[in-house]
Image (spheres, helix red, strand yellow):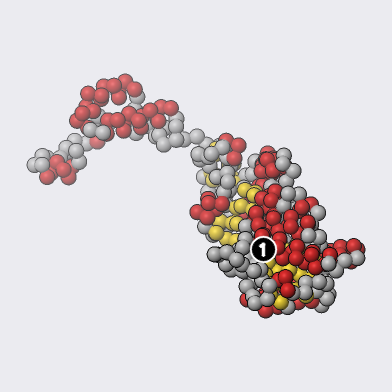
Amino acid sequence: MSEKFNNRAGKRPDKRPMEGRNLRPLGTISRPERNEDAADVSARGSRGETGRRTADRAESGKQGGFGKQTTGQGYTGRTKSDERRKVFGKSDRKGSERKYASYRLNPSRTSRAQDEYRETVSEAETEGIESTHIEGRNAVLEAFRSGKTIEKLFVQDACKDGPIQTIVREAKKNPDTILNFVSRERLDELSETGHHQGVIAYAAAYAYSEVSDMLAKAKEKGEDPFLILLDGIEDPHNLGAIIRTANQAGAHGVIITKHRACGLTATVAKSSAGALNYTPVARVTNLGQTIEELKKEGLWFACADMGDTPVYKQNLKGPIGLVIGNEGDGVSRLVKEKCDLVASIPMKGDIDSLNASVAAGILAFEIVRQRMG
């Protein structure tokens, strides 16, 4: 009971000197003394249990007790894995005799970086397809340094520590990598392992080709170029199905956009049923500018959209590029303005649209029919 409470209750405070009181210093409570005080637990309420827990920690030397603290090498605290604990060493600060902890990288982490990267891709490699989802600082950094094509990189916003900044610098060196700074909650949603460490990368399952390589391929075969351009296809199953259709229709390549579109993921590779191994895919930043450059090579373009003239009544022979729009919005206005004609598919049902991959198949094989006729 405090001195202030004693005064309020009409009791005089204890004026005895401190030397005369029977006090026990913190951190020196012994088990026999606790047993003697067990009878006073009911009077103290919950403080008796707290005192016993405090003394147990003091005797066992656990963190949080009042016992003697140890010095030397220690750990940063509780971590999820013993292997990932950061080791600290001693260092002297000038002008002071106190010891301060300074960060020292464990030498074994260098070799573990490659092990983590291999574990990340091991599951996909067993299926013959490289992994596209990479998590963890060491794994992502190793992916960059190994020359793997990283399409998108998600980094925790406002994270300024050394490893993260190193990854950001590596990403900025690669013009094909889209760098996104997002919240930790967003990273938790994207994470598949729950241990993203503030960074998640998406790598291409297959290497991209160049548009010039597609034109060279058509010239080598002695055929008029036939390209399929995708304006913002987001569903990997649709992209894989279109690549499969392009291969069967004899198209010389598929062109996709860099932003707001699906890349060459493992799902795309599976959906293509192996066609991705034979059909080159190029990725461009500006689809409209690419169309203008291909027009200089003699190609003309037809986009899939609602129009007055059905595709079966239009001339689709010669060097041609077929433009397929987004699943929801269709072909964008700027891209549509650069196309030479609109190829529409007659609709006889109650809904007014087809799946993007189905529309691409219908239009692609109409081009095949006209070339064969």
Q: Position of residue 346 (x, y in %)?
A: 64, 69
Give the residue at x 11% y 40%.
12
Q: Is residue 370 above or below residue 5?
A: below
Please name the residue that numbered disc 1 is placed on.
359
Residue 248 in view in this figure:
yes
- When the figure is inspected, residue 273 is found, relative to residue 46, above or below; the finding is below
Looking at the image, residue 240 lies above or below residue 110: below
- The spot of residue 183 in percent (x, y) is 52, 57
Residue 204 rendering spot, x and y as whole percentages:
71, 54
Residue extending farthest front? 348
Position of the N terminus by quadrant: top left
- Towards the viewer: 199 or 298: 298
Which quadrant holds residue 226? bottom right
Furthest-left residue in this view: 10
Q: Residue at x 26, y 33 (%)?
A: 46
Residue 106, quarter of the rendered image: top right
Q: Secondary structure at mark 1?
A: helix
When asked about the image quadrant of residue 223, the answer is bottom right
Q: Is residue 189 left or right of residue 278?
A: left
**Quarter of the picture holding the C terminus:** bottom right
Q: Is residue 50 above or below residue 188?
A: above
Crowd class of label 1 (few under 14; some 14 to 19; many from 20; radius 10 Å): some
Type of the residue with mark 1: Ala
Which of these two is toward me, 113 or 39? 113
| Left or right for 363, reference 373 | left
Residue drawn at the location 59% of the way across and 40% of the way down: 84
Name the residue rendered at 58%, 42% in the picture: 86
The tally of labels here is 1
Return the x and y of residue 159 as percentages of the image width and height.
56, 57
Which of 12/341 is in front? Answer: 341
